[in-house]
Image (cartoon, helix red, strand yellow):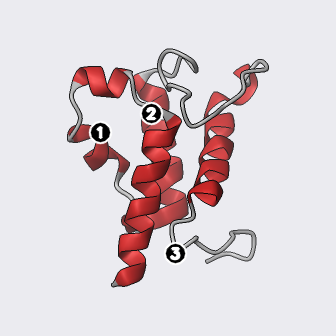
Amino acid sequence: MSSGQTAIPVQGDEAVVFEEIVGMIQSVLGEYGLDGIEITMDTQFHDDLDLESIDLVTLGGHLEARYGDQVNFAEYLADLGLEEIISLTIGQLVVHVAACLREAGEH
């Protein structure tokens, strides 16, 4: 782990995971920014943030860089139907990531 990287929240603290995912989304959106959008657990990736599939791929890369093999975003999306992906919320992803981290911490 590099000195600039914080420790992985092994317990899967949802508040910590939420803040990290919001930071990743800000990074993905880059120059477009969030234009004053308040991100909550109910914020939808598609309808509220206008993220495209390529943006989700980029977000997946951020998740992998941060959490390694403990969180497989592509596998998570593969288990969802199209409508579920379109309506995916920040909260659903936070819950998934936190559960993966808790599971990894138990092993």
Quadrant position of the N terminus in the picture: bottom right
Q: Earlier in the sequence, mark 2 or mark 3?
A: 3
The answer to which of marks 3 and 1 sits earlier in the sequence is: 3
How far is disc 3 from disc 1 in space, using C-alphas? Answer: 22 Å
Residue indicated by mark 2: 56
Q: What's the residue type where badge 2 is placed?
A: Leu
Q: Is residue 18 left or right of residue 38?
A: left
Q: Which residue is mark 3?
A: 10
Marks 2, 3: nearer the viewer? 3
Q: Position of residue 9 (x, y in %)?
A: 58, 71
1 and 15: which is toward the camera? 15
Whether residue 23 is situated above or below residue 32 in the rendered picture: below
Q: Which residue is mark 1?
A: 77
Depth check, mark 3 against mark 1: the one in front is 3
Which residue is pictured at 50% across the width and 41% down the height? 91
Residue closest to the far right: 36
Which type of secondary structure does the marked residue at label 3 adopt?
loop
Marks 2 and 1: in contact by CB < 8 Å?
yes
Q: Earlier in the sequence, mark 1 or mark 2?
A: 2
Does residue 98 sit above or below 4 in this rendering? above
Q: Is residue 83 above or below residue 88?
A: above
Residue shown at 79%/20% (left/top)?
36
Instruction: Check disc 3 and give the amino acid type.
Output: Val
C-alpha distance separating marks 1 and 2: 10 Å
Q: Residue at x 38, y 75 (%)?
A: 104
Q: Which residue is at 67% across, 75% downward?
A: 2
Q: How many numbered discs sit on the rendered protein? A: 3
89 lies left or right of 1: left
> Is there a contact, CB below 8 Å, between mark 2 and mark 3?
no
- How far apart are the alpha carbons under marks 2 and 3? 24 Å
Residue 30 on image: x %, y %: 70, 30
